[in-house]
Image: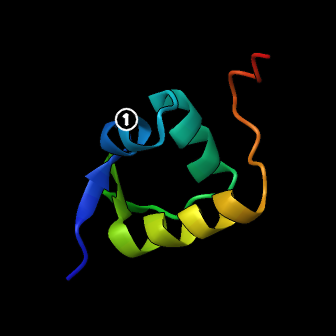
């Protein structure tokens, strides 16, 4: 069974805000499963998302700082 991560754990791993992770999930960019009111991201889905990140730039909800 895959490891499950909270949106906060995913945000820390990807160095973005938890809100950004939630937006990605809502927009279908990142796949998550819902357990009642809780969202969890499977390790396999996070790995697939990592492949997308390396080939495309995913916009953040916070906007880019240059």
Q: Quadrant of residue 43?
A: bottom left
* Relative image position of residue 25 (x, y in whole percent): 57, 51
Whether residue 41 is visible: yes
Residue closer to the observer: 42 or 35: 42
State left or right for residue 26 relative to residue 14. right
Residue closer to the observer: 31 or 51: 51
Whether residue 36 is visible: no
Location of the N terminus by quadrant is bottom left
Residue closer to the observer: 51 or 25: 51
Tell me the residue at 35%/67% (across/down).
Answer: 42
* Relative image position of residue 47 (x, y in whole percent): 46, 69
Label 1 crowd bin: few (<14), some (14–19), many (20+), radius 10 Å? few
Q: Secondary structure at mark 1?
A: helix
Q: How is the image coloured?
A: rainbow
* Relative image position of residue 19 (x, y in whole percent): 52, 29
Q: Quadrant of residue 41?
A: bottom left
Using the image, determine if residue 63 lies above or below residue 26.
above
Q: Pick out the residue farthest to the top.
A: 65
Location of the C terminus by quadrant is top right
Question: What number of labels is visible?
Answer: 1
State left or right for residue 60 relative to residue 25. right
Q: Quadrant of residue 18?
A: top left
Tell me the residue at 57%/59% (across/down).
Answer: 30
Residue bearing the label numbered 1: 12
* Relative image position of residue 53 (x, y in whole percent): 66, 57
State left or right for residue 53 relative to residue 59. left
State left or right for residue 40 relative to residue 30. left
Using the image, determine if residue 13 lies above or below residue 16.
below
């Amino acid at each position: 069974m895959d490891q499950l991560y909270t949106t906060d754990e995913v945000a820390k791993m990807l160095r973005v805000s938890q809100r950004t992770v939630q937006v990605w999930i809502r927009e279908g960019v990142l796949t998550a499963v819902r357990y009642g009111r809780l969202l969890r991201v499977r390790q396999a889905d996070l790995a697939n998302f990592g492949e997308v990140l390396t080939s495309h730039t995913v916009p953040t909800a916070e906007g880019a700082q240059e």
